[in-house]
Amino acid sequence: MKKRLLLVMLVCSHFTLLAQEDAWVYLKDKATTIANISSLTDILTAKAIARKNAHNVPIDDRDIPVNPAYISQLKSATGITVMAKSKWFNAVHVRGSETDIKNLPSSFPFIERIDFANKSLNLNKPVKQKTPTKTESTLETFNYGTAANQVEMIHANQLHLSNYTGAGMTVAVMDSGFPGVNTLSAFERLRTVGQVMGTYDFVGKDEDVYTNTTSSHGTLVLSTMAGYIENQYVGTAPDASYYLFVTEDDDSENPVEESYWVEAAERADSLGVDVINTSLGYTTFDNENYNHTTADMDGNTTFITKGANIAFEKGMLLVNSAGNDGNKPWQIVGAPADAAGVFTVGAVTAAGNYATFSSIGSAFQSVHKPDVVAQGEGSYVILENGAIETRSGTSFSAPIMAGGMVCLWQALPNKTNAEIMQLVRQSASIFSYPTYALGYGIPNLQLALNLTLGVAGDDFNTSVKVFPNPVKEHLYFKMPSNETFLKVMVFDMLGKQVLHHSVDAVTNQLDVSSLSKGLYLLKIHSKNNAATFKIIKQ
């Protein structure tokens, strides 16, 4: 018995020594700098350069790829497998034994530091990244069929009526597999006009995102934006162009998937992508030593969240599902949905009520999460066999919302990603009193457009007069003939209420002299109506 026990102990010790760990290897430099690049088109597409210039996003050394010579040397190291790379972080994700990984710096002087996914193996805390500085088609009337409620809930159908259907916009969908997208009639509209711009499987390292997968999750997600079956189903951005990227490994849950995601985001940036949709989130892993904690969901701790913040800084609009942990012990929004630079979408029912599975926000996040909600319970999707059925999850509320925001950005091409995000928040149903369950509520994308264009949305909007605008000291109100009393609230662009007043036919003015110069949102409520205006304080 003692000999058998000793043998078991030796075998276990042997396996422990050979246990594979994941780590990020951060490098000291790259092969060159932006100043030494002969042509920016060597590292970015013309569309990427144009998008950055249009939104005043600087092109910097982070846009330069990781030094390929360094990657080759790391691949040659004993016991080391290179899993992914990140130009933004100038880092390489490796897998190997703890000993082999820790031996890397002695062999390769270009290594700056190593950060193990198993945090207990890190002798020093990783250096925190800086928080990012916030910085034509044929007009068509769609029969949305089964998708009508989820499209109309956020008023994306009204944008479509104005010919904003996503044409000219580029979306990267980062998910698991996309089986059927290359064959189903539901995606024929995409294929016939070349709206699938490219594909790549960052897990399998090839361009096949259709067959090398056990999951059709990406197909279902894409259908809510790009699906089209005449008189039966229309997604929220049917005329946008799409890149399909696999970053999720369905066979395991490992931090390397965060690295795949960042690598895909970097490629999206290089390709000139406008919007990234992700219906993925990371909290815990198969190896519990790699687990994140709820305290890590602070918007700037996990690798994927820091990558998302850089992607936002690069000018892209990132829309991410909040997660489905609302009725589970974890409960709160996961990574990268915790990032300040990510527009996080929770879920409601078809009737607009909170879906109990939808992950909620918390005090850990630096900004209010989720941002908004859309239909995620009983959402209609197109399956890999072409059938239309309902599925539930924030995996579907997020792309429904993302497609709508694609159309809004098409309508407002001069707006930045941050401005589009804020307009959608301001249009939402409970913007004045957000909650951790619903965020700012259900958006009205037509109202978001009207806020910018100064267009009145209904008779109340047109009959209420607010002047002068811009204003220095006093705002005056001309009330509708059928109203005797109005409540007036003023919010800054961060959503904070700065003034509250009541007006009637006699006291029809508001003193705004105490406000700082800038742009404000004015909300006016009567007993049965409401209107929203932008005002400029001089």
Image (cartoon, rainbow, N blue to C red):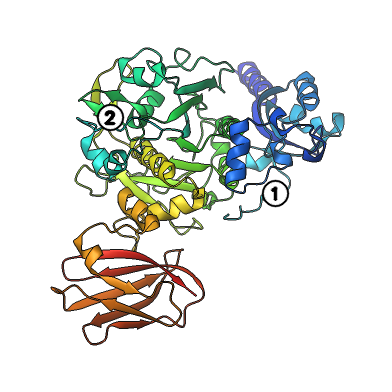
- Who's the residue at 25% across and 63% down the image? 461
Instruction: Provide residue 347's location: percent of width, then percent of height.
Output: 31, 44
Residue 179 % position (x, y): 40, 16
Mark 2 / mark 1, whichever is N-terminal: 1
Q: CA distance from mark 2 to mark 1?
A: 48 Å
Left or right? Give the position of 432 relative to 341. Answer: left
Image quarter of the N terminus: top right
Position of 460 with respect to 160 (left or right) is left
SS category of the residue bearing label 1: loop
Q: Viewer-proximal residue, 377 or 536?
A: 536
Which amino acid, by three-letter code, is at mark 1?
Lys
Q: Which mark is residue 234?
A: 2
Crowd class of label 2 (few under 14; some 14 to 19; many from 20; radius 10 Å): many
Neighbour class for label 1 at 10 Å: few (<14), some, many (≥20)?
few
Q: Residue at x 25, y 19 (%)?
A: 387
**Closer to the camera in the image, 146 or 280:** 146
For the residues bearing labels 2 and 1, Cβ distance under 8 angstroms: no
Q: Which residue is mark 1?
A: 125
Instruction: From this view, report whether residue 27 is shown above or below residue 14.
Output: below
Q: Secondary structure at mark 2?
A: strand
Any mark on residue 412, and which?
Answer: none
- Taking the view exactly as shown, the residue that stands out farthest to the left is 482
Is 534 located above or below residue 80 in the figure? Answer: below
Q: Quadrant of residue 117?
A: top right
Decide: is 423 above or below 279: below
Using the rendered view, name the quadrant where residue 512 is placed. bottom left
| Residue 303 appears in the rendering | no
Q: Amino acid at mark 2?
A: Val
